[in-house]
Every structure is written in C-alpha cells, then in structure tokens.
Amino acid sequence: MDNVIVVIGAGSIGLAIARRVSAGKHVLLADLRRENANAAAKTLSDAGFEVSTATVDVSLRKSVHALVETATEIGAITGVIHAAGVSPTQASPATILRVDLYGTALVLEEFGNVIAYGGSGVVIASQSGHRLPALTSEQNKALAITPADELLALPMLQLDQVTDPLHAYQISKRGNSLRVMAEAVRWGKRGARVNTISPGIIITPLARDELTGPRGEGYRRMLALCPAGRAGTPDEVGTLGAFLIGPDGAFITGSDFLMDGGVTAAYWYGELAPK
C-alpha cells in the first residue's frame, strides 16, 4: 500500500507544496475540472512523481466522500493539501460561502475521519480573513464547531447579512482558520496535525483575475504600499507548506500562518489603513 498525498485544487499553490512533500508517495490530484487535474498531473508525472487524478466538487458531501474512498483504496492518507476555492471576482456571495467555507469544512471532516497516524494537512486560507473586523466569541465558536451540514444555516451567514462577495470571502477565510483550529483537536486524536496558511497576493491565475478585475486598482495599491513591495510566488507558499506538513513542523497544529508581505500590517497600522 502506498502513502498518499491528496491535493485538492490543481492550482499553482497546491502543486508547489506537493512537489516538496510527495517524493516516493502517490499523489492523488483532484479538481472540479478534469482537464485541470490532468494538465497538472502531467507536469508532476514528467517530474518523476507517481500521480493519479480525480474530479471533486468540494461543495457536495457525496463528492468529497467519493474522493476519500478513492484515496483510501490507493493507500494510507498521510497528507492533505486543500487549495481549492473561488475568489470575490469569480463568484457570488452564496457560491463563495458554499465552496470556500462549507467546502473546506467538508474536506476537514471527511479526511479527518481517515487521516493516517503521523499525517498532516494544510488548508490555504487568505490574508482577507485577517482584514475582517473582530467577530464575537459566539460567532467564532459557531464558525469553528457548527456541524458542517448546518454551517450555512447560521444567521450570520444569511444572504441578507452577507451581501458582498468580498465580505463572503473574508468571512469564509476567517472561518477556515477557526475551523482548522477546532479540527486540529479531532485530528490530534488520530495522531495527525492540520494548519492553515493565509497567503497575500500570490501570482497565480486566480490572482491575475483579481489584479485585472474590478478590485484590481486596490490590489495593486496593496502591493505598492506593503512592506515587501511585491506579490509573492507559489514557491514561497510551497516552502512554508512543506515545513508544516513535514517532520520539522511536528509540534505545530491548529495554527494559522499569515504570509502576505506585510499587507495586513500596513492595513491595520500603516499606509493601507482605511481613512
């Protein structure tokens, strides 16, 4: 039986992490679109990795469960890299909440039931979750531990409360980090770990959509005024992801790692602060 690394979302960030942690293991690469998974799989296969592909819609429990079954048929699941999602420019508030918030809760729940002893997971959240104003302790707890299938019924997530795609994205990404903190307790009972990474603007196709979309001017201003003065690269996220998944990160679980070139620092305490 192989050790399996499951990568959900065949984008640049998920692949950058996978390349660093998957030597000698079987990579199961899943995406909503089969053509995306196949293209990414060819890149990994050409680089010497053992890869198979699957389709998954993270917003459907039966689809996520089918992916779990496919993975467990291959071998022991020792790593989960969850990098699927939609951005504010790409989708409506309802779709963002269903994919980015509920979908992540499903992935954590379903894979948390089968993750191998010593296994670990990384969820890609976003700097956007750090720009959402503080929630109440009750709201934090609700996002963290409400059963996945009841999550979208929370009063704070109704579409008369979440009317803007950016707000939906921010609350989804805040919810991701809270959910991971709670799930780390459950994963720990299996001897496994899970963390989130909250990247800033990383140059990927999704980021290019944002930079050229209706909010593009604001994003370009972020890059110009943040301490780092530039966007990040998928390889930089890959380096942190590999650290968290690998043995060097063995004492880290339930944590969120903000890596945004200082955008959030400048938002709260610098030139990007709201007027």
Image (tube, rainbow, N blue to C red):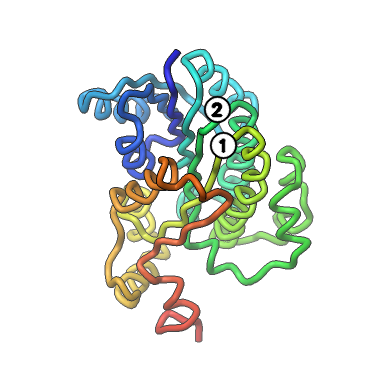
Q: Residue at x 53, y 66 (%)?
A: 130
Q: Amino acid at mark 1?
A: Ala
Query: Under tag 2, what secondary structure?
Result: loop
Looking at the image, the residue that sits furthest to the bottom is 275
Nearest the viewer among 133 and 252 is: 252
Residue 173 position in % (x across, y down): 56, 55
Residue 107 position in % (x across, y down): 58, 35
Nearest the viewer among 27 and 215 is: 27
Q: Is residue 117 left or right of residue 10?
A: right
Q: Which mark is residue 70?
A: none
Q: Residue at x 78, y 61 (%)?
A: 138
Q: Are marks 1 and 2 in contact (CB under 8 Å)?
A: yes
Residue 30 position in % (x across, y down): 44, 28
Location of mark 1 (residue):
192
Q: Is residue 231 left or right of residue 122?
A: left
Q: Amino acid at mark 2?
A: Ala
Residue 28 position in % (x across, y down): 42, 24
Q: Which mark is residue 116?
A: 2
Q: Residues within 10 Å of mark 1 (few under 14, many from 20)?
A: many
